Image (cartoon, helix red, strand yellow):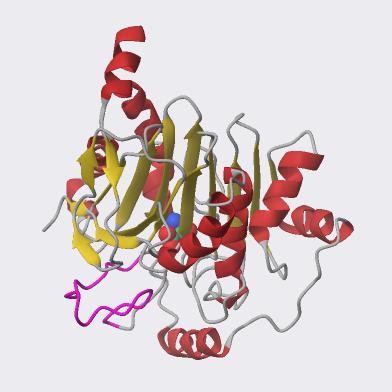
Amino acid sequence: MKSSRRKFIKQAAVIIPAASILQSCQPKMTEKIIKPIVVSTWDSGLEVNKVAWQILRTNGKAIDAVEKGANSIEDTINCCVGLGGNPDRDGFVTLDACIMDEKQNCGSVAFLQDIKNPISVARKIMEKTPHVMLVGDGAKKFAIDNGFKEESDVLSDDAKAEYAKWLEKSEYKPQINIEKRQNSETKVPGKLSNGDFNHDTMGIVAIDSNGDLSGACTTSGMGFKMHGRVGDSPIIGGGLFIDNEIGGATSSGQGEEVIRICGTHLVVELMRMGKTPMDACKTAVERIINVNPEKAKTFQVGFLAINKNGIVGGYSVQPGFTYSVTSDDSGGQVFEADSHFK
Ligand code: ASP
């Protein structure tokens, strides 16, 4: 254990160049340890990182940075995170989220309705209850009792239109769409080229200037899912895992496949054994593919990881999984992860 930890500490950290353009594959490595730093899933993470960065750059805590970052996208209308997301097949938007700090305190909320900021409810559960996870009506009651407002008429105009379109066939196809690859000129952050946009989990991991890690993961989950379905995003070790000695990981994509292998816990444990973040993500993706190589051709899963030194890496089943990295005032940068299928 000791020697693998030494090996891990020797690994180099990333340098984030100034421009926020889409880069292929991986950030560059240097000997320098990077902190503070924040990473998040998808191109849309760039805006989330900006909010988190304002806290990190003034020596704020990672747990506050990831919560406020998550809130910023939960508050956005017509986005697949928060109440603006697509509903389930019965027309209800149901939210999943979890949060974890450097002491392995964690809180989680699943199948939550009519509350705008599930990540903050998860944090309250972490801080005010002896439990980790509350779901459904119990979670909603807890939220309202703790001052969260109950929202009404939550379906966004985009979601209403998407739902009406889905109802025409009502075909139950519980599958996360695969991004169509776009070149960097035509790429619109947060939007897919094929208009078939049924997912976008925001997973965020930050290291603050003290060197402490925290993470948050928030989503409305798979569009048009079965009522009551919960994905990987609120599951500690599924959509998010933090170990302050080693690093953190988060995921997006077909939640069932991530849960099956305890995905982010696996990624962190692989980093503990000495793998780089990218290799750890790649091994986790291969584990998923080995479960059912044929089925793996039909879905997307992406893992994003950062180790204690600030080295960042991602890997996905299909091309198109992007992630955002911010470690200075330049506005951050988007990278496209390497993938198993090309
Ligand atoms: N992982 C999420 C879920 O399965 C979906 C996503 O990433 O958008 O609910």
Image vertical order of residue 146 relative to residue 161, above or below: above
The count of marks equals: 0
Residue 121: image location, x then y, percent: 72, 54
**Quadrant assignment, res 305:** top left
Q: Is residue 93 left or right of residue 323?
A: right
**Quadrant assignment, res 192:** bottom left
Q: Nearer the viewer, residue 60 or 41?
A: 60
Image vertical order of residue 260 relative to residue 43, above or below: above
**Quadrant assignment, res 111:** bottom right
Figure quadrant of the C terminus: bottom left
Q: Residue at x 76, y 76 (%)?
A: 151
Residue 135 visible within the image: no
Residue 153 visible within the image: yes
Residue 122 included in the magenta stretch of the image: no
Q: Residue at x 20, y 74 (%)?
A: 184
Residue 125: image location, x then y, percent: 74, 45
Q: Residue at x 86, y 61 (%)?
A: 147
Q: Residue furthest right?
A: 145
Image vertical order of residue 13 relative to residue 97, above or below: above
What is the span of residues highlighted in magenta in the rendered image? 176-194
Q: Nearer the viewer, residue 71 or 111?
A: 71
Figure quadrant of the N terminus: top left
Q: Is residue 206 left or right of residue 108?
A: left
Q: Residue furthest left?
A: 342
Residue 192 included in the magenta stretch of the image: yes
Ligand 1: which quarter? bottom left
Q: Is residue 202 left or right of residue 321?
A: right
Residue 339: image location, x then y, percent: 18, 53
Residue 15: image location, x then y, percent: 28, 47
Q: Is residue 201 left or right of residue 51?
A: left
Q: Main secondary structure of the magenta part?
A: loop
